[in-house]
Amino acid sequence: MKNYDVALLESYYYMNNFFLTKNYILKHAHKIQHLPITLIVGRQDLITPPLHSYQLYKKLLNASLLMIDQAAHSYLEPNLSKVIKEQTMKLSKSLSKKSKNYYFNVNNINKKYNLMR
């Protein structure tokens, strides 16, 4: 896919509110509130304003919110990229410890946590 194609696709989703009703994610946050979640947001993000991340964070019981200075929305920004890499490594290590005797099955997870409704 070329950059133009990606931009066109992103614009299409953005113009259609990502095909979600208003406040859909906040209204359904209860479905994932028990999961360990790390929200990472750039302090200067105009696409996903920090206030929106904070509102979601307040609805999640087991979440952490990392607000990154001198960063906006792109994962290519150095400060944001660094934190995303660090958090991904942290999650990877955590999952590898838990997964030694654990069979990861997406369908079972969807059923268990009722994520697909």
Image: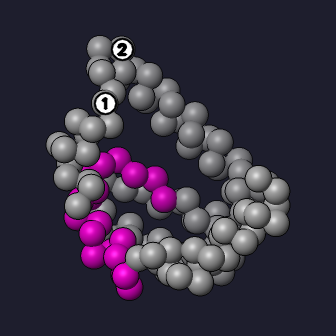
At 19% from the left and 52% from the top, the residue drawn is 114
Q: Earlier in the sequence, mark 2 or mark 1?
A: 2
Residue shown at 53% from the left, 82% from the top: 16
Q: Farthest residue toward the right?
A: 3
Seen in the image, is 4 located left or right of residue 68? right
Q: CA distance from mark 2 to mark 1?
A: 14 Å
Task: Report whether 82 appears left or right of 40.
Answer: right
Please tell me the numbered disc located at residue 13.
none
Q: Which residues are magenta?
A: 21-39
Q: In the image, is 86 to the left or to the right of 52?
A: right
Whether residue 109 can be seen here? yes
Q: Secondary structure at mark 2?
A: helix
Query: Vertically, is 55 above or below 60?
Result: below
Q: Is residue 31 magenta?
A: yes
Residue for point 34% across, 76% down: 24
Q: Quadrant of residue 41?
A: bottom right
Examine the rendering and report whether any part of residue 55 can be seen.
no
Residue 105: which numbered mark, if any? 1
Q: Tell me where residue 102 sits by quadrant.
A: top left
Mark 2 is on which residue type?
A: Lys
| Quarter occupied by the C terminus | bottom left
Q: Is residue 101 above or below residue 110?
A: above
Q: For this rendering, which residue is in front, 98 or 14? A: 14
Of labels 2 and 1, the one closer to you: 1
SS type, badge 1: loop
Q: Amino acid at mark 1?
A: Asn
Residue at 37% across / 82% down in the picture?
21
Residue 38 percent across, percent down from the top left:
46, 53
User: Mark 2 — residue?
Assistant: 100
Image location of residue 85, percent across then percent down: 65, 42
Whether residue 12 is in magenta: the answer is: no
Q: Is residue 16 above or below residue 107?
A: below
